[in-house]
Image (cartoon, rainbow, N blue to C red):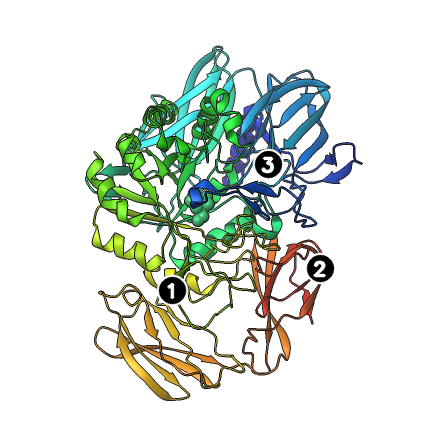
């Protein structure tokens, strides 16, 4: 009896599934060529430039970067990563439309850039922004159709590495003449017991039914567009997801479409000096990220992104700003699943150009279309908690800036039925943004750096909150320590690296400690988005005129995804569930014997004692009155002797709670491998260590990589912003004793040797 019931259920499901629109991801079957070149088989997403080679002349920009305070033009090398993204490229493949198809389209999640789409030689669509999703309708005639996608990248069109080509997934939609439009549904929760749904359809619809499932269990159902129930709220701590099933019936009563969408139930409130998620006040512990995935380039990979988000979550991070562009669909899926609150951004510039051939070329004709697709595509993701209409736009300095801000803000609300999801933009030209009315217009007033202006912004707002849309811009290179240790704004070092003592910042910014002091001293701040979570390709400030620097130094983690010391500083404040105890620097400095070598400790404990070879260097406490001792413990006069550096942290009762020891390394003896798998990708961190397993922090040996059957080598990266070695050759020099190799496939048989 039981078997019979299951079989019957399976038959019903199969019949229903046949009515649903099919959404097919088109990853394989593509061919690619640079203009005039030879076709080669590729998988999509694809970034035609990441394989290099690096070249100083690529997109060399002779410009003054006004927002960095520059008055005179200078030769900027590496600004966009020095990889060959400029020019044209083409992709082709066939798609098959089955007979009886009533609706067919291609949904592109992002093509870098200015894509044009042709079907059987006829142009069927185009877009401008390389970051936004767009849909093109295809003919429904049954049979094979030839698809051609052209992309083109101009010189001086970006302030960072944009990547090149079909950088995000492409989907083929096959449906009936009657059905839910792509991005046609809107799901939101006015309170934690109510889910509202609006469904926009194509064709003549009879009725629409909704059901909400938790796994396989039906929670509630309705045909009114309002569903009630006892829902578990979505939050970073408990990212509970439900499924909305929408069934669309044609006028004759037949089922025409069935769509399943994941969503979460959560409420947002901004105002009265607070941000509330599900009724509880919290401050954003967020990072800004560009879209590139380091050595994998701009070709989006869900597993690589999941690794990035996992590493950030383990640090205690709970939010992400997709600076300065529209997020990819799969990015948001990962954020929904892991519990990362997202500021979904749209533009880095409006009408006024930051770079000659930037979005300014298209803004007037395209901004409404871009805002619409951004909002319609992203609105059902519980992770998206605010929209951003811009980053440090030059219009802050003009009379027109406030009106344009208002128009963009209203445009977001036009397509988002959740009135509580608010709009922000990163303001920077203080006090002009206040004088010209932009700050007062914004529902979430937000500033980039510029801590001295927080109070003035707060006084100027109606909502009584201020967000750090971008904070810190502290620069560091993993494993680099310069002496003496002098907190300064961007000194230049001969080897084009920045200190890992985390005391160097850009002239327009500050240190993490300054942001935290501002947040702690002003209850009406609602948190921050640090610039940046990971290093990224391009923007190698302060070495943007000093070839061969070609990637950023801002990251909390390096380009390979290896934590810098700063990771532990943020972790000590942000991770509220486990303790942090980390020592800076390493303790292997041949030649520094007898010299002052400061020691910093990043910890959530307030008090600790440091020992060098068993001799106490003093027991100290954090000092709320001192800029650099409020959140760190520092012993500034330690004299270096090789051996053992040990710290003992004390809890509130004065009891020894945790100990950490760092040892001087001997000669390099072997390579150890740390493997971590994310879906189909295996990430292997190789470390050159001495006979006792201590990291050799200056080892720079060339490491060769190979793997067993079932795995395919994909990319390699050492986190050195000045390295011109290829990301796609299976060998590279270690940087400060480490590098990361990435493999795709099954198994974990990997060899990395000196
Ligand atoms: C900000 C800008 C970011 C990045 C950062 C570097 O002003 O919004 O895109 O350039 O500076 O510190």
> In the rendered image, which quarter contains the C terminus?
bottom right
Is 121 drawn above or below residue 481 in the view shown?
Answer: above
Numbered circle sitting on residue 169: 3
Distance CA(mark 3)–CA(mark 1): 44 Å
Q: Which residue is drawn at 46% across and 40% down?
A: 332
Numbered circle sitting on residue 730: 2
Packing grade of label 2 (10 A; few <14, some 14-19, many >=20) is some
Check disc 2 and report its element: helix, strand or loop: loop
Is 691 drawn above or below residue 105 in the view shown?
Answer: below
Packing grade of label 1 (10 A; few <14, some 14-19, many >=20) is some
**Towards the viewer: 178 or 3:** 178
Can see residue 510?
A: yes
Residue under label 1, please give it.
Answer: 487
Packing grade of label 3 (10 A; few <14, some 14-19, many >=20) is many
Can see residue 229?
A: no
Q: Which residue is drawn at 21% across and 50% down?
A: 522
Q: Residue at x 46, y 39 (%)?
A: 324
Distance CA(mark 3)–CA(mark 2): 26 Å
Count of marks placed on residues: 3
Task: Say which quarter of the image contains residue 42.
Answer: top right
Label located before the other in sequence (1 or 2): 1
Numbered circle sitting on residue 431: none
Locate residue 154, reporting x and y percent: 62, 33
Distance CA(mark 1)–CA(mark 2): 38 Å
**Towards the viewer: 10 or 195:** 195
**Towards the viewer: 753 or 528:** 528
């Amino acid at each position: 009896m039981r078997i019979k019931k299951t079989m019957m259920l399976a038959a019903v499901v199969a019949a229903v599934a046949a009515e649903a629109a099919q959404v097919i991801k088109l990853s394989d079957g593509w061919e690619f060529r640079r203009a005039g070149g030879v076709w080669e088989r590729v998988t999509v997403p694809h970034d035609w430039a990441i394989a290099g080679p690096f070249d100083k002349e690529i997109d060399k920009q002779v410009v003054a970067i006004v927002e960095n305070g520059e008055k005179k033009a200078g030769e900027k090398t590496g600004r966009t990563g020095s990889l060959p993204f400029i020019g044209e490229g083409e992709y082709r493949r066939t798609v098959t439309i089955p007979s009886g198809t009533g609706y067919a389209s291609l949904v592109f999640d992002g093509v870098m850039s200015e894509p044009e789409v042709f079907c059987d030689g006829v142009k069927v669509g185009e877009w401008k922004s390389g970051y936004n999703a767009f849909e093109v309708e295809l003919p429904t005639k049954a049979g094979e159709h030839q698809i051609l996608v052209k992309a083109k990248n101009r010189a001086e069109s970006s302030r960072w590495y944009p990547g090149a080509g079909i950088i995000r997934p492409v989907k083929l939609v096959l449906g009936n003449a009657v059905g839910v439009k792509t991005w046609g549904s809107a799901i939101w929760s006015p309170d934690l017991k109510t889910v509202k749904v609006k469904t926009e359809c194509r064709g003549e619809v009879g009725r629409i039914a909704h059901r909400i499932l938790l796994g396989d269990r039906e929670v509630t159902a309705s045909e009114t567009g309002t569903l009630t129930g006892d829902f578990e709220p979505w939050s970073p701590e408990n990212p509970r997801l439900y499924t909305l099933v929408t069934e669309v019936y044609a006028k004759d009563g037949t089922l025409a479409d069935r769509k399943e969408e994941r969503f979460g139930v959560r409420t947002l409130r901004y105002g009265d000096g607070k941000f509330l998620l599900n009724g509880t006040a919290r401050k954003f512990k967020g990072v800004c990220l560009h879209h590139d995935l380091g050595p994998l380039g701009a070709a989006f990979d869900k597993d690589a992104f999941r690794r990035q988000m996992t590493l950030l979550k383990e640090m205690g991070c709970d939010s992400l700003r997709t600076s300065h562009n529209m997020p990819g669909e799969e990015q948001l899926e990962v954020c929904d699943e892991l519990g990362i609150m997202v500021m979904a951004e749209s533009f880095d510039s409006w009408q006024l150009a930051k770079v000659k051939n930037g979005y300014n070329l298209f803004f007037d004709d395209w901004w409404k279309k871009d805002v619409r697709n951004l909002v319609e595509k992203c609105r059902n993701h519980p992770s998206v908690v605010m929209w951003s209409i811009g980053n440090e736009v030059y219009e802050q300095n003009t009379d027109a800036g406030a009106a344009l801000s208002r128009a963009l803000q209203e445009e977001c609300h036009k397509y988002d039925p959740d009135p509580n999801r608010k709009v922000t933009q990163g303001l920077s030209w203080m006090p002009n943004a206040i004088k010209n009315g932009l700050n007062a217009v914004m529902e979430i007033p937000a500033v980039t750096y510029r801590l001295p202006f927080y109070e003035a912004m707060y006084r100027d707002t109606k909502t009584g909150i201020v967000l750090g849309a971008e904070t810190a811009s502290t620069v560091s290179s993993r494993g680099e320590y310069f002496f003496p240790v002098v907190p300064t704004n961007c000194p230049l070092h001969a080897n084009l690296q920045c200190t890992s003592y985390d005391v160097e910042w850009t002239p327009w910014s500050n240190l993490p400690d300054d942001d935290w002091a501002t947040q702690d001293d002003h209850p009406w701040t609602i948190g921050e988005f640090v610039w940046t979570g990971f290093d990224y390709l391009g923007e190698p400030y302060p070495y943007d005129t000093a070839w061969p620097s070609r990637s950023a130094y801002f990251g909390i983690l390096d380009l390979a995804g290896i934590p810098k010391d700063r990771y532990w500083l943020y972790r000590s404040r942000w991770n509220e569930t486990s303790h942090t105890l980390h020592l800076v620097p390493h303790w292997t400095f041949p030649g520094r014997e007898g010299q002052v070598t400061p020691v910093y400790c990043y910890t959530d404990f307030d008090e600790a004692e440091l020992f060098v070879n068993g001799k106490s260097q003093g027991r100290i406490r954090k000092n709320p009155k001192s800029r650099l001792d409020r959140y760190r413990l520092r012993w500034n006069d330690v004299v270096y002797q090789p051996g053992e550096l040990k710290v003992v942290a004390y809890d509130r009762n004065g009891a020894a709670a945790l100990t950490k020891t760092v040892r001087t390394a001997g000669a390099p003896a072997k390579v150890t491998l740390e493997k971590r798998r994310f879906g189909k990708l295996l990430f292997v961190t190789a470390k050159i260590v001495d006979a006792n397993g201590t990291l050799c922090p200056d080892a720079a040996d060339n490491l060769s990589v190979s793997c067993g059957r079932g795995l395919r080598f994909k990319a390699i990266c050492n986190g050195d912003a000045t390295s011109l070695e290829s990301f796609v050759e299976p060998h590279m020099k270690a940087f400060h004793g480490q590098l990361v190799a990435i493999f795709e496939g099954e198994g974990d048989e990997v060899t990395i040797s000196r």
